[in-house]
């Protein structure tokens, strides 16, 4: 710690960060309260992306802190291998009741990345249990982000991940095209009308590989990390129909959309398409304690419940699966969401965000705007020869304007906390307007 109170920044190798740039231009967050962060220099900034999509209840929720503290005092850790503890079962039951009908078995992990890999393993194990061991291929989608596990990178479609770590990726993977075509859907509000036919590429992949080799299709209902890419009307329905017809497991990665972001418990319910598994993480504990998991359709679960009762049905899990403190945080989070009606509040705020963000259409550097639920993205025209530089400049100017923005490439994403007021959403966009006018 130096004389300004700044710690030595050298040891921590930061994730998904330009470390050298950050350590020359650090922004340190020291406090969170409601929809705001406070930086080390005392500036207060609006949390435009709910942490990393994970703090919809805002920061500093006393109810969650109290539940975590009480749990640490009562039971700090208990294994869930061969024994259990009550809160893991209680939280699993609560999550199952929030999920679409039929998805009522919950497997816990510790992050979205672990949860994705767990879902892929469950899909493979399900087919093996049914005597279809040739079903080993996973179909992902271009531009998809399914975390940083080997399964998630294999199914994912973020080019730099695949270029860097492709040697570790599974060879039994193929990809659907992404659904974003600016020429057809610029400045779309909600689900674009164009693009449902892109799901039919799955039929081509079935013909290429043979359905008897395909275990699962995994997609994000809304592709978040790549810039809020919204599914076209009818697209997910078509994927569901093709998967059902060919006996392929359909997995929704709802790490971002789960627990209210689109205005319903899960995107599956808002979009009226029920997958066979839902992957969740992030908002389930309001970001307070790492927790993720998979909600599994009972039919898949029961297929593995064969053989002698004393045998392990699924050789998979984590030391911290269903950690008592994480489960306490999850139960408290769901309590707050229900008591304060926060998913309904997100649904009410969505049209406010839509109206305000699309009013930026004619501002400098704006190439496209799109939104769904309480989430939106603004594509900026790149600087010639310097992709990503304009969005980074917007990020830095945002700090000066009291906004903590999220940028990927030249896309700015916003997904404010559910506890935000209408005025705060409007002010966020008005400040962003000023940022766009100031950057080069």
Image (cartoon, rainbow, N blue to C red):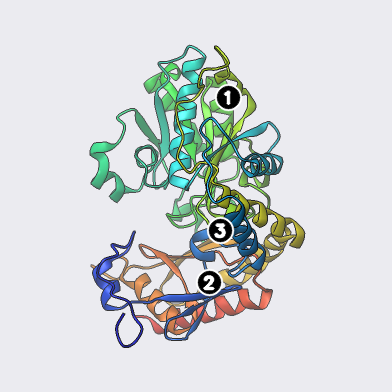
Residue farthest along the front direction in this orientation: 74
Residue 429 coordinates in the image, percent (x, y)? 55, 76
Q: Is residue 386 visible?
A: no
Q: Is residue 28 visible?
A: yes
Q: Which mark is residue 47?
A: 2
Residue 327 coordinates in the image, percent (x, y)? 60, 49
Q: Mark 3, mark 1: which one is toward the viewer?
A: 1
Q: Which mark is residue 106?
A: none
**Quarter in which the C terminus is drawn:** bottom left
Q: Which residue is mark 1?
A: 300
> For this view, does 130 lie left or right of residue 259?
left
Question: Looking at the picture, does residue 51 appear above or below residue 263?
Answer: below
Q: Which residue is mark 3?
A: 188
Mark sitting earlier along the chain (3/1): 3
Mark sitting earlier along the chain (2/1): 2
Question: Looking at the picture, does residue 379 appear above or below residue 119?
Answer: below
Say what secondary structure mark 3 lies in: loop
């Amino acid at each position: 710690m130096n004389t300004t109170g700044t710690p030595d920044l050298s040891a921590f190798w930061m994730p998904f960060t330009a470390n050298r740039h950050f350590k020359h231009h650090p922004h340190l967050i020291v406090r969170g309260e409601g929809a705001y962060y406070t930086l080390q220099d005392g500036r207060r900034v609006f949390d435009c992306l709910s942490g990393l999509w994970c703090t919809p209840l805002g920061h500093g929720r006393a109810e969650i802190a109290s539940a975590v503290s009480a749990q640490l005092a009562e039971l700090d850790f208990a294994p869930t291998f061969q024994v259990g503890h009550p809160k893991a079962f209680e939280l699993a039951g609560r999550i199952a009741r929030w999920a679409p009908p039929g998805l009522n078995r919950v497997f816990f992990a510790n992050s979205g990345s672990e949860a994705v890999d767990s879902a892929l393993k469950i899909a493979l194990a399900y087919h093996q249990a049914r005597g279809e061991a040739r079903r080993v291929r996973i179909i992902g989608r271009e531009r998809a982000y399914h975390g940083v596990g080997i399964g998630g990178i294999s199914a994912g479609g973020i080019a730099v991940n695949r270029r860097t770590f492709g040697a570790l990726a599974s060879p039994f993977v193929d990809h659907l095209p992404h659904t974003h075509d600016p020429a057809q859907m610029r400045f779309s509000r909600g689900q674009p009308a164009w693009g449902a036919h892109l799901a039919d590429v799955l039929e081509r992949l079935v013909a290429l590989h043979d359905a008897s080799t395909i275990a699962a299709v995994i997609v994000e209902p809304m592709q978040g990390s790549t810039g809020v890419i919204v599914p076209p009307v009818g697209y997910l329905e078509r994927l569901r129909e093709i998967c059902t017809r060919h006996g392929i497991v359909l997995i929704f990665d709802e790490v971002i959309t789960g627990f209210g972001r689109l205005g319903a418990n899960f995107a599956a319910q808002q979009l009226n398409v029920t997958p066979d598994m839902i992957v969740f993480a992030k908002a389930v504990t309001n970001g307070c304690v790492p927790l993720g998991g998979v909600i599994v359709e009972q039919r898949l679960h029961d297929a593995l419940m064969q053989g002698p009762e004393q045998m392990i049905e699924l050789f998979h899990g984590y030391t911290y699966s269903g950690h008592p403190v994480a489960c306490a945080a999850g139960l408290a989070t769901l309590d707050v969401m229900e008591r304060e009606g926060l998913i309904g509040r997100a649904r009410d705020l969505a049209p406010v965000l839509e109206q305000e963000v699309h009013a930026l259409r004619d501002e400098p550097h704006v190439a496209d705007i799109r939104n769904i639920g309480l989430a939106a993205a603004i594509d900026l025209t790149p600087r010639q020869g310097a992709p990503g530089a304009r969005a980074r400049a917007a990020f830095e100017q945002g700090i000066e304007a009291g906004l903590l923005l999220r940028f990927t490439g030249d896309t700015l994403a916003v997904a404010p906390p559910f506890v935000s007021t209408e005025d705060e959403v409007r002010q966020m966009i008005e400040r962003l307007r000023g940022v766009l006018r100031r950057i080069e």
